[in-house]
Image: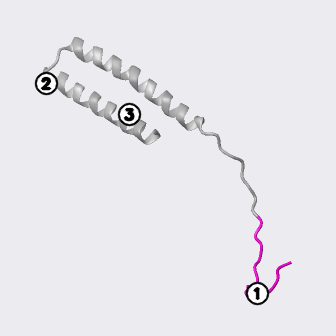
């Protein structure tokens, strides 16, 4: 899930890049550019918040100590 959110955040950055290029080439109006950038900034904050939420959502179990029991080389020999 988090990996998908990273992809989404990367796509958001790419969209900002292309919006800047379109504005500098005068393919879109300044008003449209600013409206979209404002929306993308808000969306970026939401994606970052959701990533943070997803990281803290999973409960980590405390470490467990395991005991290693030695087994005889002879399977017919009884163990203690």
Instruction: Report the residue at 34% width, 17% height from top.
Output: 38
Specify few, some or many for label 1: CA neighbours under 10 Å numbering under 14, 14-19, or 20 or more.
few
Residue topped by disc 3? 9
Most extreme residue toward the top is 31
Could you tell whether 28 is left or right of 11 in the image? left
**Nearer-N-terminus badge (1/2):** 2
Instruction: Report the residue at 24% width, 17% height from top.
Output: 33
Could you tell whether 44 is left or right of 19 in the image? right
User: Gap between marks 1 and 3, in whole Å?
Assistant: 61 Å
Q: Is residue 50 magenta-colored?
A: no
Specify few, some or many for label 2: CA neighbours under 10 Å numbering under 14, 14-19, or 20 or more.
few
Residue topped by disc 1? 76
Where, quadrant-wise, is the C terminus in this rendering?
bottom right
> What residue range appears in magenta?
67-80
Could you tell whether 49 is left or right of 32 in the image? right
Up-down relation of residue 74 to residue 46 (above or below) = below
Residue topped by disc 2? 25
Observer-side mark, 2 or 3, equals 3
Observer-side mark, 1 or 3, equals 1
- Name the secondary structure under disc 3: helix
**Nearer-N-terminus badge (1/3):** 3
Most extreme residue toward the front is 76
- The image shows residue 65 at horizontal and vertical percentages of 76, 59
- Name the secondary structure under disc 2: loop
């Amino acid at each position: 899930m988090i990996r998908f959110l990273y992809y989404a955040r990367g796509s958001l950055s790419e969209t900002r890049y292309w919006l800047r290029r379109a504005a500098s080439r005068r393919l879109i109006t300044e008003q449209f550019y600013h409206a979209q950038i404002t929306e993308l900034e808000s969306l970026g904050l939401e994606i970052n918040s959701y990533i943070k939420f997803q990281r803290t959502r999973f409960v980590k179990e405390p470490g467990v100590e395991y005991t290693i029991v030695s087994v005889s080389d002879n399977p017919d020999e009884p163990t203690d």
